[in-house]
Amino acid sequence: MSAPQSNKIPVQQVDLDGTKHRVHPRFVTGFYQNIRVITMYALLAAFLLLPWLRYNGRQAIWLDVPSQHYYIFGMTFLTQDFYFIAAFAIIAAFALFMVTVYAGRVWCGYACPQTIWTHLFQYVEKWVIGDRNKRIKFDKEPMSATKVFKRFLIYFIWFVFSMITATTFVSYVSGTDALYNSWQMIGFIPFPEWATWIWVSVFIFAFSTYVNAGYMREQMCIQICPYGRFQSVMFDKDTLVVSYDYERGEPRGARKKGSNPDNLGDCIECLMCVQVCPTGIDIRDGLQVACIQCAACVDACNDIMDKVGYPRGLIRYTTERQLAEKEKSRVFRPRFFAYLTLLTILCGGVLYALNDRVPLEIDIRRDRNQLSSLNQQGMIENSYIVKLTNKTQDAHTYKITLAPQEGLSLEIRFNDVPLEAGESFDMPVSIYGDPDVIEFGQTPVTLNVSSEDGKYHVSKQNVFTTQGQ
């Protein structure tokens, strides 16, 4: 095969008919795989351990959907704070776009949950059956007691991992106390005493984990995940991608160790790059949708080049500008700076909003049935409902007062309003106005709410009306 005469990295159009071909990748070590494994399992460990962290006596990260209270390291968010969640999602999206513009699909290869769990499940197969050749041979063997036992052992370990994953996911919502400390005895067997929604959620997450990591595997990346589709829109000539150097590698061919035939390139046709690929592609066919840029082929090829005495880098992280046009790549370019600027603005805005956020909320609603009324003492009365929400993670006692204003006075049922962490309470209050002092129409009034310890204070304005009198 002769090297293609093109000034672009070849792009291979893969078959997307959905046919399932089981891929048994060979596990390889190397510079990039060491980084990849450390990154993947550090993220996995963080996912499993974060629900157990405590902060101020409460689960540090607890998305309590049933009660619509969301606790994150001392901050309490309610449903009305949904804009923070939207902001975090937008920041995550733009961060992913910026990383993709610079380094391609490194998220897929190094941090995507589908990649992490698939790698874990495949390693279980390697531990039970053996390396790639043994797994391929095992699939072709006729059914036997040994094969049934090994299959059962693999499926059982997958099931255990799926259940651990599912219960961890659910513990972020239900809380670890409700999930792991609720047990009942059925006969002599302890059985979890969970709400129906917990059972349903655990089943869904366990089933999804088992199917996605145990069966779908690379098909999730090739057929279902949209990220691989729109990545081409974000790629440019300076995006780092895993590429095969055609000019150096072609024509391919086997040769004896130590020899370097003039009619052959550096590729010795060992197929190691194909054997280690978790999606089963041949990177030598060009840039493909199925490539998750895990760099397993890079480490495998570098190892082979060391053994045959050729320079490393036949397959490497590079850019189209470097590989095809032989020019220096531009790291800092307008698209990168555009995403960086947007991220800076978004992160700055969220940090400012979080810092300026008072963990006490007050809402004043007027009595819509009657704007105002005249009591027996001849005072004009306006009725309101003051809703207090304690967004802190501690219990506090609050006091409601009226900002001093001539002719107006506040009548309240309780002088003190004790609220537990995250609790809301509707307090009916009345404001009385002296008709000889206040003006006819609408008069602005301000209600102040302060915590007993003086730590939190918030004010809200409404109007006192004399209309209809």
Image (tube, rainbow, N blue to C red):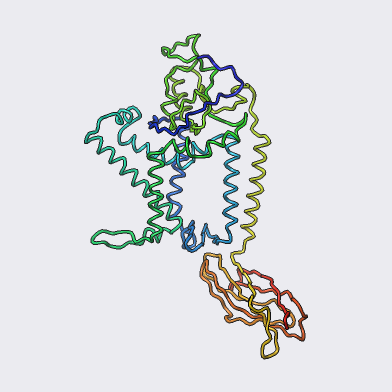
Residue 58's spot in the image, x, y percent? 47, 61
Residue 322's spot in the image, x, y percent? 61, 24
Q: Is residue 274 above or below residue 115?
A: above
Residue 291's spot in the image, x, y percent? 49, 31
Q: Is residue 52 visible?
A: no
Front residue (pair 8, 106)? 8
* Identity of the residue drawn at 76% across and 82% down: 438
Q: Is residue 433 above or below residue 424?
A: below
Q: Is residue 310 left or right of residue 404?
A: left
* Identity of the residue drawn at 44% across and 18% down: 269
Q: Is residue 49 left or right of residue 449?
A: left
The image quarter in which residue 6 lies = top right
Q: Quadrant of the C terminus?
A: bottom right
Q: Is residue 130 visible?
A: yes
Front residue (pair 428, 111)? 428
Q: Residue furthest left?
A: 145
Q: Is residue 415 above or below residue 114?
A: below
* Identity of the residue drawn at 37% across and 40% down: 214
Front residue (pair 233, 167)? 233
Residue 399's spot in the image, x, y percent? 60, 76
Q: Residue furthest bottom?
A: 376
